[in-house]
Image: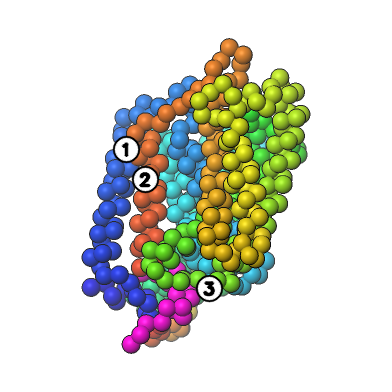
Amino acid sequence: MFPFSFEWIWDMSHVVFMGGLWYALSIIGLGLTYCILKAAVDTSQGKGAGHHH
Amino acid sequence: MDSALIPEGVKRCPLWKFALGIIIVGVVLLWGVYAMFLCWFKGLNQTNMNDAYGFAIWIWADLAVIALGGGAFFTGFLRYIVGKDELKNIINCTIVIGFICYSSALLILAIDIGQPLRGWFIFWHANVHSMLTEVAFCLSCYFAVLTIEYLPLILENRQTDKIPFFHNLSHNLHEVMAVFAATGAFLSFFHQGSLGGVAGVLFGRPFAFREGVLIWPWTFFLFTWSAAAYGPCFSLLVTRIIEKITKKQLVKQNVIELLAKISGWMIATYIVAKIIDTWYWAAVTAPSNGFTLLDFYSGNALYGIWILVLEIVICGIVPACILITEKGRKNKLAFTTAIILGVVGVSLNRWVMVLQVMAVPVLPFESWNLYYPSWQEVATTVLPVAYGIILIMISYRYLPIFPQEKELNPIES
């Protein structure tokens, strides 16, 4: 639910609950995006190529 | 045939043996899937739930697996936030277990809501006054965290690791894992707590109702505490079972003992808090609502005072005493008994807080509501167990979930 949804009310419950959800999703999303982008950059720079355990 | 996928330097059983195991467990899985589809297509009339029992046995299973999966967030917290570096040798296993537990919990909820296609309503049309909304939010987000924690393990498979992008991605994920682990610990604290809070705020049911701090009843804190305390017992038990089946030592004894010791102290402190909570509830809260302690444990065929003794003494004090002593941890039989009792203890606590709460009569003219699950409920409750076994089998065979395995079990050439 977002503030532009028709059932949204500007009260503490909505701000805390939905704010907490967006906060957690933002950290997860940003963290994952950073890792994927960095991996793409690293790969384009030739890092990890020819790596074998 | 699949040797190219098996991690280097370790030995696995022949493929036919592995496939046979998957097929046997797969039959049980299919039984559960069949029951699940019955519930989805025919509706919740396939269950024995009724007006008195709005929570079926699978809600107990749901709460139990969430508590047992608590080993993942607590071990992650200890490893990445507290800095217990030795736990890196068991954390992969706890992540796989956590992933299984939380995906099972979400699967159970998808069956329980009856209309899984409307599952997203809980996010979009959220009831912000419900503790279960918070549980749904945190559960889904934490499952995303567990998936991210599981991902590097999959990427470290011998074949996927050869692809530079996957190798780099896995490396990067490891680098920022502390951020995900901290987020996971934060989310787990709240959803474990809110599951306890759901029972504690039921002021119309004196068996569950507890007082507390601000909006949080004491059960909020007890649920989080018990998940952190007993969750590692389940991780240790699964590790023990894998070691028994594979006839190998997979984790060094010092790592096992460290986690067991922390778990033991957590259980010890939790059980003291639980005893104080139970005493206050029995002496003050319940009498203020017109009930005595024995009203909750008499007049029916199943729930006697034995269940309270079993939960607190046998499955609480006993494992705590074993795990906090070095002698107890070093004795294999005592150690195994303690972790089994721990797993039973937390599962029993969730049973009491979900199913006994529904069974206890509330009004003077009511009698006990004893509930018997239908076969569809049993099958859908067994389903996550079969799924979990299959995922552990596949993960153990193809992924490096035990980093010390190679060192502890050198292959003779």
The residue wearing badge 1 is: B35
Give the label, 3 or 2, closer to the camera: 3
Answer above or below: position of B174 versus B412.
above
Rounded to the nearest angstrom, the CA distance separating label 1 from label 2 is: 9 Å
The residue wearing badge 3 is: B252
For the point 68% across and 49% down, the residue is B270
SS at badge 2: helix
Rounded to the nearest angstrom, the CA distance separating label 3 from label 2 is: 32 Å
Badge 1: how crowded within 10 Å, few (<14), some, or many (20+)? many
Contact check, label 1 and label 2, Cβ < 8 Å:
yes
The residue wearing badge 2 is: B383
Percent position (x, y) of residue B153? 44, 68
Chain to which the residue tagged by mark 2 belongs = B
Chain to which the residue tagged by mark 1 belongs = B
Which residue occupies the foreground of this view, B286 or B120? B286
**Is residue B279 in sight in this rendering?**
yes
Badge 2: how crowded within 10 Å, few (<14), some, or many (20+)? many
Answer above or below: position of B5 versus B241.
below
Answer above or below: position of B7 versus B305.
below
SS at badge 3: loop
Rounded to the nearest angstrom, the CA distance separating label 3 from label 1 is: 41 Å
Query: Which residues lie in the magenta part?
Result: B398-413
For the point 37% across and 45% down, the residue is B383
Contact check, label 3 and label 1, Cβ < 8 Å:
no
- Answer left or right for B43 relative to B60: left
| Residue type, numbered disc 3 | Lys
Chain to which the residue tagged by mark 3 belongs = B
